Amino acid sequence: MASKASPLYLVFALLCTDLSSVRPPSESCFLRVPYVRVLPEGLKDQTQITIRGEPKPNAEKFAIDICKGDDIAFHFNPRFNEDGKQVIVRTTRIRDVWGPEERELPFFPFSPGKPFEIKILCTSSGYRVEVNNEYLLHYSHRIKELHQITHIQIRQNVVLKHVHIESCFLRVPYVQVLPEGLKDQTQITISGEPKPNAEKFAIDICKGDNIAFHFNPRFNEDGNQVIVRTTRIEGVWGPEERELPFFPFSPGKPFEIKILCTSSGYRVEVNNEYLLHYSHRIKELHQITHIQIRQNVVLKHVHIDFTPQVPYLQDLPEGLTDNALITIRGEPKGNAERFDINIHKGDDIAFHFNPRFNEDGNQVIVRTTRIEGVWGPEERELPFFPFSPGKPFEIKIFCTSSDYRVEVDGKHLLNYGHRMKQLDQITHLYIQQDVVLKYIHIDFTLQVPYRQDLPEGLTDNALITIRGEPKANAERFAIDICKGDDVAFNFNPRFNEDGKQVIVRTTRIRDVWGPEERELPFFPFSPGKPFEIKIFCTSSDYRVEVDGKHLLNYGHRMKQLDQITHLYIQQDVVLKYVRIDFTLQVPYQQDLPEGLTDNALITIRGEPKGNAERFAIDICKGDDVAFNFNPRFNEDGKQVIVRTTRIRDVWGTEERELPFFPFSPGKPFEIKIFCTSSDYRVEVDGKHLLNYGHRMKQLDQITHLYIQQDVVLKYIHIEL
């Protein structure tokens, strides 16, 4: 019997052949199977292998092997009838030992006698396989040295027509049409590198001529590296977002960007590090028409995946709310032992939902909470166990002020009382283990009329944030800040009052409405168009901002903020989010349009964060800093408060001497800064701390107060 030639022998034979005399086969030719293609320089990132052919009419299986000598880096093995099933086995063989098999697939793309085109894209992370222009699977590298790949071989029950190997770069500008738009949990993966002399590049997610999300890294904008994010609607660019923890790009250095589309916004990760979240300004994902990538970038790979990956993480930058609804559709894997759904507050887990399919012969769902690494008591009792391996499910988790209420396939399953009650401090949802995910959606729509009680009233500097949209046929809606039956502030947009758009503001005391205020610089609402309203409560008035633009001030007619009892929202509005924040956002800026005055008093209440290294209070004149007050908790083992001035980007002499250091991480403080004609006098918790003589004496030219870094702010008041 003839001996079987080994793959290495075939490789050697081909290497000894004068390949220059061999013409590539035409499309009409058939290639001999088994087929071996030598790769004398190996593979590299973004090499694409294209294979055209068809399974034989009576095909049982065929195999494509990407090999490193006798090892097989990627074994792709469609089987047409394995115990009555169609599967594609993927695995790796090292030193004659086969590794674990991967078998799960969204569909089986082959039929005996039916032509196919397979594209295998080699990336830095794995092999991406597409069949007949449909994405099929990703196989992560188990042998990572692409340059050591020696050959590709194709064998068994297949008619082979064409094999082509090429380096793959996409043309820029690049456009990918999205005929069905995007949907919640779609992931866009982009691999490439900025050109060596790159100034900027842009990724745009578009709705026709509008740009829902403009992601624009700039390598040198006035000496700074920034990533501008914004939205363009009807030719008008909206406010820019620029703050970032780091800048992840370098000219000529490869990157991988992942953009996850969620119900709340776009979550961006670069090279597997979380970078930013951009909240939707155009919310209709299904109306997205295309993605475009342009300017100074070399583009290697773009992939859009509509199936959520496991483990799965969804950030919740604004937490959850009472009445939020989490919907999860999927199915346990065929061999599932367990999976879990975790609602997190940082590293803590507020709600751990953990179905186990065989725990000592029992099916159970463990529910518990983890705080500072310690798991709490478990809840296990259930009326029924609703999951089966391979069987689709729909889980709904209703978040209420008292508990999480879980429903599976339309049947109520359990309530889990809150052990961590601050829903607004929830940071993310995390799902892992033996589950295939199909769909995840978080709905923050609140019931209207909506009421939120305020048992301790409001305070100076409280912030009310309201997101929603007027109904498509809206005539009016109303936001009322109430003191019992009285209405301290009635904010009432009307869409057609005698042919005009107006916002009526007034107060009701003992059932009597006061004079109305109606004058406005603009009317910011449109039926069906999302809005964000911010109402800042100060000691003198309510200051209203819509979509980042100041709209109006309403002077108090009822001045006792601590006697406010509730917020009430009603009529023709879809309500998505309501939050009342008694903590100010950091970094914090308060403009001072008339500057400061002799005898002005700045009062600041807050506390350093638990792990605080430093924080800073800056009294500014434009880009200059008249007074920089900078407590540092561990500078070479010492606690110091640096005071200085910055003029034209040059910091002046530092003052550091102090009688005592008044701050501790996590401990509340009250700072009072008295402005006099000669200096700033600082008092902390009622004790005089220091004087800082003016180096910029024009108090009336002070433009703003700015507070940043490791501090939680509770209250700021400036008295002129």
Image (cartoon, grey):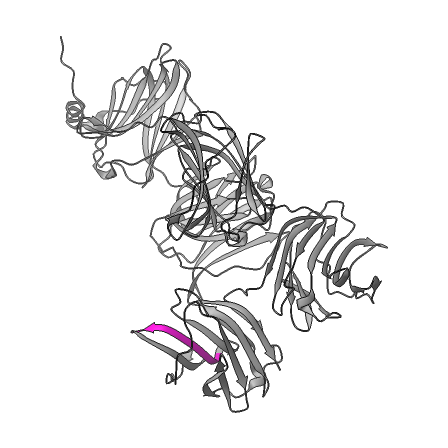
In this view, the residue farthest toward the top is: 1
Q: Is residue 374 visible?
A: yes
In this view, the residue farthest toward the bottom is: 678
| 162 relative to 184 in the view: left or right | left
Q: Residue at x 63, y 45 (%)?
A: 445
Which of these two is toward me, 704 or 193?
A: 704
Tell me residue 199's x, y (percent).
42, 58
Is 642 placed above or below 402 here?
A: below
Which of these two is toward me, 124 or 314?
A: 314
Is 228 placed above or below 56 here?
A: below
Tell me residue 410's x, y (percent).
58, 30
Which of these two is toward me, 153 or 514?
A: 514
Residue 83 is one of the magenta-drawn residues: no
In the image, the segment drawn in magenta is 625-636
Q: Is residue 648 visible?
A: no
| 184 relative to 162 in the view: left or right | right
Q: Residue at x 29, y 19 (%)?
A: 31
Indicate the quadrant containing the C terminus: top left, top right, bottom left or bottom right. Answer: bottom right
Is 3 placed above or below 693 here?
A: above
Residue 635 is one of the magenta-drawn residues: yes
Tell me residue 104's x, y (percent).
39, 27
Tell me residue 42's x, y (percent).
23, 36
Q: Main secondary structure of the magenta part?
A: strand
| 610 relative to 705 in the view: left or right | left
Is 137 placed above or below 710 here?
A: above
